[in-house]
Amino acid sequence: MVPRYSRPAMSAIWEPEARYRIWFEIEAHAAVKMGEMGTVPPSAGKALWDWWATNPRIDVAAIDAIEAVTKHDVIAFLDWVAQQVGPEARFMHQGMTSSDVLDTTLNVQLVKAADILIADLDALLAAIERRAQEHKYTPTIGRSHGIHAEPVTFGLKLAQAHAEFSRNRARLVLAREDVATCAISGAVGTFANVDPVVEEYVAEKMGLGIEPVSTQVIPRDRHAMFFAVLGVIASSIERLAVEVRHLQRTEVLEAEEYFSPGQKGSSAMPHKRNPILTENLTGLARLVRSAVVPAMENVALWHERDISHSSVERFIGPDATITLDFALGRLTGVIDKLLIYPARMQKNLDRMGGLVHSQRVLLALTQAGLSRDESYRLVQRNAMKVWESDGELSLLELLKADADVTAALSVEVIEDKFNLDYHFKHVDTIFARVFG
Amino acid sequence: MVPRYSRPAMSAIWEPEARYRIWFEIEAHAAVKMGEMGTVPPSAGKALWDWWATNPRIDVAAIDAIEAVTKHDVIAFLDWVAQQVGPEARFMHQGMTSSDVLDTTLNVQLVKAADILIADLDALLAAIERRAQEHKYTPTIGRSHGIHAEPVTFGLKLAQAHAEFSRNRARLVLAREDVATCAISGAVGTFANVDPVVEEYVAEKMGLGIEPVSTQVIPRDRHAMFFAVLGVIASSIERLAVEVRHLQRTEVLEAEEYFSPGQKGSSAMPHKRNPILTENLTGLARLVRSAVVPAMENVALWHERDISHSSVERFIGPDATITLDFALGRLTGVIDKLLIYPARMQKNLDRMGGLVHSQRVLLALTQAGLSRDESYRLVQRNAMKVWESDGELSLLELLKADADVTAALSVEVIEDKFNLDYHFKHVDTIFARVFG
Amino acid sequence: MVPRYSRPAMSAIWEPEARYRIWFEIEAHAAVKMGEMGTVPPSAGKALWDWWATNPRIDVAAIDAIEAVTKHDVIAFLDWVAQQVGPEARFMHQGMTSSDVLDTTLNVQLVKAADILIADLDALLAAIERRAQEHKYTPTIGRSHGIHAEPVTFGLKLAQAHAEFSRNRARLVLAREDVATCAISGAVGTFANVDPVVEEYVAEKMGLGIEPVSTQVIPRDRHAMFFAVLGVIASSIERLAVEVRHLQRTEVLEAEEYFSPGQKGSSAMPHKRNPILTENLTGLARLVRSAVVPAMENVALWHERDISHSSVERFIGPDATITLDFALGRLTGVIDKLLIYPARMQKNLDRMGGLVHSQRVLLALTQAGLSRDESYRLVQRNAMKVWESDGELSLLELLKADADVTAALSVEVIEDKFNLDYHFKHVDTIFARVFG
Amino acid sequence: MVPRYSRPAMSAIWEPEARYRIWFEIEAHAAVKMGEMGTVPPSAGKALWDWWATNPRIDVAAIDAIEAVTKHDVIAFLDWVAQQVGPEARFMHQGMTSSDVLDTTLNVQLVKAADILIADLDALLAAIERRAQEHKYTPTIGRSHGIHAEPVTFGLKLAQAHAEFSRNRARLVLAREDVATCAISGAVGTFANVDPVVEEYVAEKMGLGIEPVSTQVIPRDRHAMFFAVLGVIASSIERLAVEVRHLQRTEVLEAEEYFSPGQKGSSAMPHKRNPILTENLTGLARLVRSAVVPAMENVALWHERDISHSSVERFIGPDATITLDFALGRLTGVIDKLLIYPARMQKNLDRMGGLVHSQRVLLALTQAGLSRDESYRLVQRNAMKVWESDGELSLLELLKADADVTAALSVEVIEDKFNLDYHFKHVDTIFARVFG
């Protein structure tokens, strides 16, 4: 976790204190159910929750001190709780294994993280939609291979981003479900010393499903899937970030990351406003993506379990979720406040002297009865002049002045071929698909 | 694609001929709908399908020869079709862009591939379930960290694998849906020259959904998700393969990959039966997983599209699906014919002289009123003897001969603590969760 | 391997026939040395080489047919050779293990591949140097964050690429050395049945070093390193490819991938020349890079060896080397024939109305005694006008017309600050560092 | 960075204070040289170093507070230094760009990190060598595919590890060199406002080489190579860790991670000593390896620079080096104190009743004149009995009792074939290759 790329709500999930709180809840819920079943005295669960109701502070340092002696984190925690609660607490953890607590806790953390990320996506989707609607019909050049192709609208660009992040939201909802399981199944997952009803009870209380079959550990294919989805979301962030970086290039300058009116650009050069937020997002995307392969390598644990996954998760658990949360927040800010320059878009669109319309003229000539070759020749000879003038000449004017062209097409028809609206007649359809 | 790791049905999807067949279908369906709408003569679609009904051979070499001249694969194909079908064919592809054909085709291929992989998973699940039921109550030692822990059944090991691959099946069904879209939206995705109803029609005919908003290309987050799911499945394959490799170790030998009775082991050493199929699967898992990151790097195309994704997909499209299909088939064979040795499992289980039961005795002593420390001491002093004898001595016998122990527990009670069935009382519950 | 991304010389290395030829040489050299040592009759090696001198065809199909029966590739090959050579051939492979042949062969292939790649890099370096010298002093704008910064020369851009690929060449030479080892050490690497002098002899004959300690297999850290270096080279290819893609953008257009004078751009739009070669290189870079992680995962084989690495290498061995060879060749062609537009570079450089020189004026004002704040204010008020005019106004003219500025600086001094040469005074130094 | 997987010396390199100290040194050295050249007053450098000689505390919080206002880390630092040193400090950073300081600093940090890692490797190599010499002739079974193959010595296993880590050390020395460069070249790397001699001077003072051509940034292929080497080292760590995990399996138990005599195994089961250190190392290896791909993705910056690499490096710079340092230290401890059980090795070696020697007997029979088939039959019929007895019978005894065998071979000859020393005759040669 790098503090400058983190936000408090997500970071809090991964604090030691938050972890211990989840541990406690799992143990206390289990104790209650075991009490009901007569495995332990019913007073045990009550004592635990009574103490909890006092809203006690978790003394992380004290627990650490015990762990330094016992060399076992869960035992250290149980000892500390027992010191606070008294003898009733000794019935905690009966028949359970450390992994029951640790794995269920990790899943609770991932579920909480997913909830924040889903909210992040909602905020991002709202920002994208607002700007998309605002620029639904703002003409801009569509580019394939970085080369001017045909006109689109700026709203369409954002509609695509919206559709993509909507898919990501749906994927994340499923990935959240994938890790939302609870295992309380004892040493090697046989429930030998803890009844499955305890698992069911704790699962329900913690807002999780039961893990159908655990082998001491919750199987890591669930987590692999979870981190894979984070990697896909990060890649979509990169896509939108790269779009902004391109638009902000000096020669393009169709949009810019927000800067406040009084803000100084770098030194004396007022044009030096760098798309550093989206460059940063490009890097953060690489980082989030780097969690995917180790999460997959974690799946093949030996037999019923080994602990090789644990160190990996201590890194990628916090890092991938905190960084993605930060990145989604940053991207939302970028889109929300993006400076969008329709005039410049129009200027760029016109920059090729109308060459983007050449294909429509070609088609009209063909439809007017000229052969495809002849049509191509007529368009091409005018288009080349425009091209060589670097956009100084206008294709429309040249065509209207070309007798061979006007012999086939009236001036009105030619002019109609230069109508941008032709390209935008289905924008509404697409918006309806995306925004409903 | 490496021939030795491929199977015909999956490879066929990626043959040039199969690809051209899909191209044709997309173009012909589009022509029909355009004919209905009056964009092109209705005779065009009819001519195409009439020719197709003759079940014509696709002359890949001829198309390649045209491409060598035109430098454009789709145009080469259209030219060749036009040569076969006659002048009506010139209305094909009207208002469409190459990507409409290419991207939709890739998705058709991935959908077909997913269908095979889903069938593969079904076959694997069936094999796993059969062997799981067969060994539902076959006792074997559960191992954490590679060290003997407590008893499980061999059926439970397979039940866990079943649950894991069931999840993978569900993920793949969703990933299939993710790539099951069709785009016929023209140059930069605006439908400027092709009506959205054509897309809807072709999509339905090809068994796909529509791509809500495409930008010449179908967005690559869909494919990133698809390959990520393949990577997760591969990781689960690795897990089960590693389990078999461990079980087949000389010192463990609880199971072996099948070898026919007459088959020679390596040279004169009859024990030299190597788990080469599962070792191979471990390697193939690495390979399938290696497609995930490039698929994610493919997401951030520039503006409306660049073509950097294409070369990546020419590799990972066939490689990841063909290899995963092969791996699933191989794993199914391994599980189906796995030689399982219950006697050896029992021998290994007994190898520690009953130490796996020490914890239950400890608990019984505590419940009989001894302090935890005293209980621990009593168990430990006997356990250590067993341990030092390398399993020659029996913990049960030693305990029964320890007066301090028998003072607290009757022989019947002690013997009861060595009952394996205690550990298996919830096997049925777990099986019900997994197999319903 | 995807044929369209392969070149014959590199592909040939990975053909079955080439592989068998290397197998033969290893076996025959070993037989000669064993003959000298009296382990086998000296006639054995002679018979093998005599046959080889007849330049026999390798009948791959026949060998495959034997393998279909024996299920063992090396044995199948030895049988086939024995059929050709006669009884003397039965002394081949004495005391050796299959891995001795297979692993040494893989290394021979990687060394041959490295030799081609080194030659590729030399060709690329030559092309880069030629174009760098050609444009040593061609002014162009340097861009940080995609935003105009200060002037550089086009030659400097290429000098950087040259330095980077020189480093890559040096890395590849070392990586080649890393895999240039030969192991002939028998079953588990103890030389129990084959004397180390055989290994030494074969190594020397095959142009390899000895593997100091092998454990049946040659350790895979060597190969991990090799593929990692290929991944770094691929990343440098991506960097230069991305540079060209940026330069070819419609709005920038400072360079273009070559197209022949008569070549048609896409349809009627003469500007539609897409940087498809460099986009393709961007994708190929992702692919080559994807070999790195599986190659690293191959390192941790179990005990003396398992065979999980083998399937991975059957893919990445050919794929990564063939693809990188192709990519280097393609990049060399791109650079060699790159259309470079100095006039457009100058136009872009001037586009900001001289704002790129504002910093030097600022400094001059400070040195003339004005406070930094005052200097900044003077420059800024003129710079803002230029900026708002979108480059229509000239900073130089505005400054010369600003009395507060001319009060501090003479017109000559102001004009001097707009001198591009100021920025290029150390180009020669840098070229000397790079090109010697 | 996860505190539990970090050691102080390496972590200290990445502390803010350490970073600022390097910044200062770079700036102060540059100021001295600029003073010599007359670019700035000679008093500037002197003032800086005079202040430094007072061993001042770096007030990180104060610098952070300034950065919160200026939004620029380097400027904030320079302001703070100026506050401490007085007016002379305003000449710092003349003609330099922030990247000059930041990139050179990162390289200094990586060089320092490499120095620690090289020392780590030396310590690991020493531990491995000591244990290798100690067990140079300790017989143990060599395993291919996890199956018993032929005898090796435990020293040979460690000799292989030594050779592998020696290669890694050599790679790291080169990787260190790769990142040991200094760039002081100004805005876009043209040295327009700072003379190359300043770079040369600072480089020498900081123990670095000059960066031949920088483009504001130091090219990231250097760092990609660096992290790739860390990934290879991590993979070698995984290999040795996996070996230990295998050896510690209950059924194998030829070695164990150290535990102190009084240390309790898990609960009452004295055999429950888990190889958690090496499992942890397996996970840490995955983590270090995950830095490789993002480091490679960082290479393709746009034009002269973008800042996407920066966020990636803030994570992987500390994480990969700190984790690898920790892992090397942990592995050294594991090897240093590894509990090695020669008796158990011998027991396992004998476990197959001498089957590991069957190949030598087979060869002897052939050499005694029997056909290969007949020889095979004789050995096989005895070997099968041993195999079916699960090692209860002895191959040697059975062979001596088989009249057909003794007709061909004397008892002495047969017994000689069961001599382990036969396999160890070249151990000395191998040790000489590895340890010199």
Image (cartoon, coloured by chain):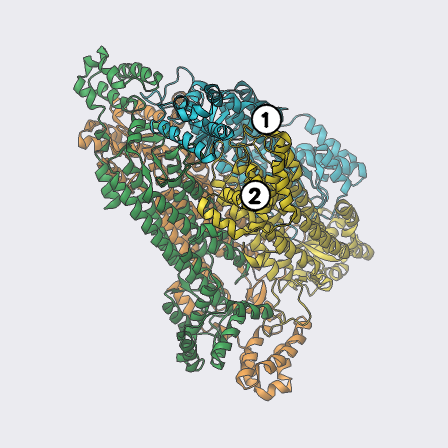
Chain colours: A orange, B green, C yellow, D cyan
- CA gap between label 2 and label 1 equals 36 Å
Q: Give percent across and percent down for residue C356.
A: 70, 55
Tag on residue A112?
none
- From the image, state whether disc 2 or disc 1 is nearer to you: 2
Instruction: Identify which residue is drawn at 44% across, 57% down.
Output: B11
Q: Amino acid at mark 2?
A: Gly
Tell me, yes or no, if residue D220 can be seen here. Answer: no
Q: Give percent across and percent down for residue A128.
A: 45, 58
Q: Which residue is mark 2?
A: C86
Instruction: Identify which residue is drawn at 37% across, 38% down.
Output: B244
* Residue that protrudes farthest toward the bottom in the picture: A407
Marks 2,1: beta carbons within 8 A: no
Q: Quadrant of residue B337?
A: top left
Q: Above or below — where is D108 with respect to A337?
A: above
Q: Above or below — where is A281 with respect to C40?
A: below
Q: Give percent across and percent down for residue C421.
A: 79, 54
Q: Which residue is mark 1?
A: D430
Q: Which chain is indicated by disc 1?
A: D
Q: Is residue A344 left or right of residue C409?
A: left
Q: Which chain is indicated by disc 2?
A: C
Q: Above or below — where is C173 with respect to D25?
A: below
Q: Amino acid at mark 1?
A: Ile
Tell me, yes or no, if residue B119 can be seen here. Answer: yes
Q: Nearer the viewer, residue C379 or B265?
A: B265
Q: Above or below — where is B75 with respect to A79?
A: below
Label 2, secondary structure: give it.
loop
Q: Give percent across and percent down for residue A234.
A: 47, 50
